[in-house]
Image (cartoon, helix red, strand yellow):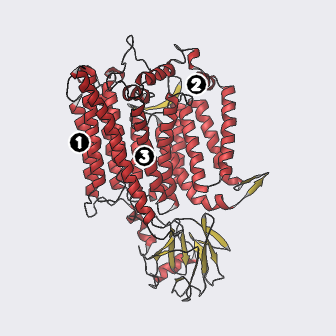
């Protein structure tokens, strides 16, 4: 790295064609094999539950999925990086459970194409899952430098805000929420991608201003605060979250963004006063929203007493609670839940908003705890990668990426169980949906990429200026 | 009991058992990873990596584990000796206070720079920041844990 100023751009490009030195990943291989066996047994159990025959439920679909996981493993072995070996199997198992669930739900929920060749829910989800594995593998093998993330943090922030504004203005209203953005044939939910951009921006901002945020004080009564200009992003974030609630009517995304923002601020500065202010702002904002807006008040009323209107507003929650109750401790078994009642789904939107209720019915409390345990593993890996990262940016980035998945899983799981008001976020890696799967794949891919130590040192934070640069040129 | 029903139950419980076996294996490997990290000697609060050093002392690429107070300069009594014509004999001192690192310039002739900006008195130094003393550039990193 001599004369770094001149050569830095060249070395920060992904070195795809570098020498290939394969490095075995035995832990990953063993865990993947165990995950594959688990999924095969699950598929047999599903077939037994559905038609009483002994065999795989959809051998082709599961085969394609397991082959994709195996290829992802081989690609990582060939790339020879020392990255995390636990994340891929854990996410692979969650995705596999998702595939079994989608194969088992009524296939007509989602269709792609027409006539004989039309693909049902299970096949469409399979396509998205395979694409997600491709995204994970590509990021994990190709991304050798994080300079493109940390250098352009304000560009990322601008992209994020532009996405948000585009959705505000051109978004299509689906079921009273303005979440979906359609560009020609492609439609997606930008808030899924936005959460990744938010974490990248916050990691850049907090790692750059961390010393200032920690050290300098403005006294406000008994509270010691960081300098006021540095509180501006906090207020801006609060305003953006409120904007999402008012214009997009998306309480879930607002809650997720705000929670991740607070958690990251605390992780980076260790100042409880910031968290206290954030929570006060949150309570004030919630009270304001609940008094001003009908849709927020409705959600809260349903949460407090869904049985007040069990066939109308409270229907989804009531049905979800019934599903968990039917499951009991060990569940009814895969494929033996109630798929249809009187020609319609017992839980509307089960494939996007209530996959945990379906799993709770078929796998029982024991199964749901195992699924939640898998999310804890994802969070632990992210925090561990953050704790051993060489510099602040990577540490905060890894922490944020792990939290964004963990908090989202918590918000929707708590919504399904009537612990929190129901909000329409997806269960990461399990819910049906391309935007959600791909955004979470980006999260896992980035975590894998930054878990590899020692490949690319963090770039110099800024260029040398003035006489120092002249001095270096003179000596070189 | 109906044998068909028995098979269904066995497969169903086997699936749940495998889920937990998978979790147990994962947790096992996480614990091994954490124990290995805990055994790692030297809970140093950070390290300095030499990014550029035209004079060859210290060598480029070398990394120093830092004590809570580390002095830098040309004099041999410094914890990190910087043999550079533009470095003063007692050039700067790094201190770890509370949760972060600080660099203080000890009245050197050519100054100490953090990310290209001159250090006036005491300046905070974040992990990943780059510091220059004379022509030598050093980067502060978290201590290796794995």
Give the camera-side residue of B134 and A62.
A62
Q: Residue at x 32, y 27 (%)?
A: A334
Would you say the residues marked 1 and 3 are in contact, meaning their CB atoms lie under 8 Å apart?
no
Q: Earlier in the sequence, mark 1 or mark 2?
A: 1
> Which label number is shown at residue A378?
3
Q: Earlier in the sequence, mark 3 or mark 2?
A: 2
Label 1 marks which chain's residue?
A
Q: Secondary structure at mark 1?
A: helix
User: Callout 2: few (<14), some (14-19), or many (20+) C-alpha neighbours within 10 Å?
Assistant: some
Disc 2 target residue: A303
Left or right placement of residue A60 versus residue A243 in this view: left
Q: Based on the displayed image, in which of its 4 quarters is residue A245 positioned? A: top right
Label 2 marks which chain's residue?
A
Same subunit under labels 1 and 2?
yes
- Quarter that holds the N terminus of chain A: bottom left
Q: Secondary structure at mark 2?
A: helix
């Amino acid at each position: 790295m001599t004369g770094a100023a001149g050569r830095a751009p060249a070395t920060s490009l992904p070195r795809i064609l570098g020498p290939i030195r394969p490095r075995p990943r035995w832990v990953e291989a063993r865990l993947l094999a165990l995950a594959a066996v688990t999924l095969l047994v699950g598929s047999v159990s599903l077939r037994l539950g559905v038609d009483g025959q002994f065999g795989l439920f959809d051998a082709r679909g599961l085969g394609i999925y397991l082959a994709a996981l195996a290829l992802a493993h081989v690609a990582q072995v060939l790339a020879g990086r020392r990255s995390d070996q636990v994340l891929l199997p854990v996410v692979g198992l969650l995705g596999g459970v998702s595939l079994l669930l989608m194969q088992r739900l009524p296939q007509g929920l989602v269709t792609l194409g027409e006539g004989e060749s039309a693909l049902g829910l299970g096949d469409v989800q399979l396509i998205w899952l395979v694409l997600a594995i491709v995204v994970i593998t590509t990021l994990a093998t190709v991304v050798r430098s994080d300079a493109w993330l940390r250098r352009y943090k304000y560009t990322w922030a601008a992209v994020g805000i532009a996405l948000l504004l585009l959705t505000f203005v051109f978004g299509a209203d689906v079921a009273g929420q303005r979440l979906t953005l359609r560009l020609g044939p492609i439609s997606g939910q930008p808030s899924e991608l936005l959460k990744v951009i938010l974490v990248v921006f916050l990691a850049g901002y907090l790692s750059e201003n961390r010393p200032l945020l920690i050290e300098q004080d403005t006294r406000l009564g008994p509270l010691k605060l960081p300098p006021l200009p540095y509180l501006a992003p906090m207020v801006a974030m609060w305003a953006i979250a409120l904007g999402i609630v008012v214009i997009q009517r998306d309480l879930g995304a607002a809650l997720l963004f705000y929670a991740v923002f607070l958690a990251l601020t605390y992780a980076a500065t260790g100042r409880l006063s910031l968290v206290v202010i954030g929570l006060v702002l949150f309570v004030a904002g919630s009270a304001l929203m609940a008094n001003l807006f009908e849709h927020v008040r409705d959600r809260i009323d349903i949460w407090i007493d869904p049985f007040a209107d069990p066939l109308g507003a409270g229907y989804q929650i009531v049905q979800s609670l019934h599903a968990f109750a039917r499951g009991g401790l060990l569940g009814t078994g895969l494929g033996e839940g109630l798929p249809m009642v009187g020609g319609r789904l017992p839980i509307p939107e089960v494939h996007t908003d209530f996959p945990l209720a379906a799993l709770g019915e078929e796998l029982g409390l024991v199964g749901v705890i195992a699924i939640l345990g898998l999310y804890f593993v994802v969070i632990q890996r992210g925090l561990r990668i953050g704790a051993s990262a060489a510099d602040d940016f990577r540490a905060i980035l890894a922490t944020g990426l792990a939290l964004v998945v963990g908090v989202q899983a918590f918000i929707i799981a708590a919504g399904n169980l009537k612990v929190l008001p129901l909000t329409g976020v997806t269960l990461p890696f399990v819910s049906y949906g391309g935007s959600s799967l791909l955004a979470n794949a980006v999260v896992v891919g980035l975590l894998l990429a930054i878990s590899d130590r020692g490949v690319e040192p963090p770039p110099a934070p800024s260029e040398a200026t003035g006489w120092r640069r002249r001095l270096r040129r003179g000596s070189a | 009991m109906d044998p068909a029903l028995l098979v269904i139950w066995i497969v169903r419980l086997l699936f749940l058992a495998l889920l937990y076996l998978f979790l147990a294996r994962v947790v096992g490997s996480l614990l091994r990873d954490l124990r290995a990290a805990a055994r790692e000697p030297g809970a140093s609060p950070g390290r300095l990596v030499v990014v550029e050093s035209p004079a060859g002392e210290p060598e480029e690429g070398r990394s120093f584990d830092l004590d809570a107070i580390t002095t830098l300069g040309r004099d041999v009594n410094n914890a990190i000796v910087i043999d550079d014509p533009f470095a003063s004999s007692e050039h700067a001192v790094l201190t770890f206070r509370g949760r972060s690192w600080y660099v203080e310039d000890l009245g050197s002739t050519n100054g100490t720079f953090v990310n290209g900006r001159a250090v006036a008195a005491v300046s905070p130094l974040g992990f990943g920041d780059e510091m220059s003393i004379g022509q030598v550039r050093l980067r502060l990193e978290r201590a290796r844990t794995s």
